Image (tube, helix red, strand yellow):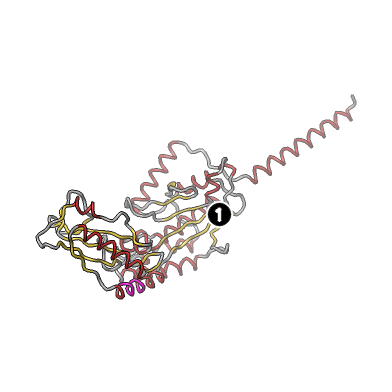
Amino acid sequence: MSNFYWGLVALGVAVVLGIQMHGWWMTRRGAPRQAEPEPDTYAAESASSRAADSADGTADDGPSDPELGALFDDATRFMVPEVPRRAAMDALIDVIATIEPEMPDNVWSGTAVLAAMPSTSRVGSKPFAVEGFNPATSSWEVPTARGRYIALQAGVQMANRSGPLSEIEFSDFVVKTQALADQLDGVVEFPEMVDEVARARELDAFASQYDAQLSLNLRAKQVAWSPGYVHQNAARVGFVAGQLPGRMVLPNPQEGLPPVLVLSFDPQAALAEDPDQSAIRDLKITLDVPHVESALQPFERMVRIATSLAQEMDGGMVDDSGQPLNPKAMESIARELVDLYRVLDERDLAAGSPLARRLFA
């Protein structure tokens, strides 16, 4: 065969290979970013770093932007003193009715109290609770089988994020509490419904005004992210997997308290048959302000972490309308939070306290 023939064959092969390479490149370019294998030593160092972060309340990485950096260099100006935590049931946010024995010297066993308790711990959309006064400890406590009580108090929360206590809910509260008292041969004294419902509405109006849930959005600039890639980068700044698909949390240093921050993305991407091919273009980092104490500097940490992730993952920080966020907007929010923390403190509802977590729930 002639050289011309073999030249055509070579040209054809080159064209086919070129098309295949172009297709491979386009497919690779359009595929979501994947998590990178990490050596065991790096994973151990990363875990150690995250543990230290939880202990001292700082994130691993800080923003390179000097304007954003200034927000954290003087972070103490946004801090307010930690307020001591209070007891479970409190007249500040609860309607409380006291139950005493008909015979003054009677003492109720914990077993009898537990047997007489209502089957549900809610009145409408509000939590319902019972506490007993234990003379051995001179304190109110949740009844236990081994306890002995000379008085009880039943309470219903006056407001939460579903609204204020209504007249119907107050009436249900009376029915539940009276039934408990009747079974224990007790005498119950209720506050006036009109007064308590009015207090509930006032408390709800206050809570609605100072209920702040902040969020920062990260958007991929070019290449989308896979769930594994998101998990890997989020873990490097302290997040751990949450209980729900598409959710990670930055744990509170104190065990049992709500997370400092929540990172979320499309749960369908996490539940896909092949998660590596799921394309994620948006992440949301959320701070439930009343649930996290100000001493942890949660907003500063949110901005710091979001900035670090945006730099590492080639993303941009945007608001809910997709507009880029700027340092001046962050500074303004930080200043507004100082006022919010102060007002909550003045009402004995410090952010992160048990009462604040109950009210803003």
- Left/right of residue 329 with respect to residue 349 in the rendered view: right
User: Is the residue marked by circle 1 packed among few (<14), some (14-19), or many (20+) residues within 10 Å?
Assistant: some
Report if residue 84 is visible in the image. no
Q: Quadrant of the N terminus?
A: top right
- Left/right of residue 100 with respect to residue 276 in the rendered view: left
Nearest the eye: 149 or 348: 149
Question: Can you tell which quarter of the image residue 76 is in?
Answer: bottom left
**Majority SS type along the magenta span:** helix
- Left/right of residue 238 with respect to residue 116 in the rendered view: right
Nearest the eye: 317 or 281: 281
- What residue span does the magenta drawing correspond to? 196-202
Please give the name of the residue rendered at 41% of the width and 53% of the height, measured from the top-left corner. Answer: 59
Q: In which quarter of the image is the C terminus?
A: bottom left
Report if residue 40 is visible in the image. yes
Q: Mark 1 points at which residue?
A: 282
- Left/right of residue 99 with respect to residue 204 in the rendered view: left
The magenta stretch spans residue 78: no
User: What is the x, y in percent for residue 114?
Assistant: 23, 52
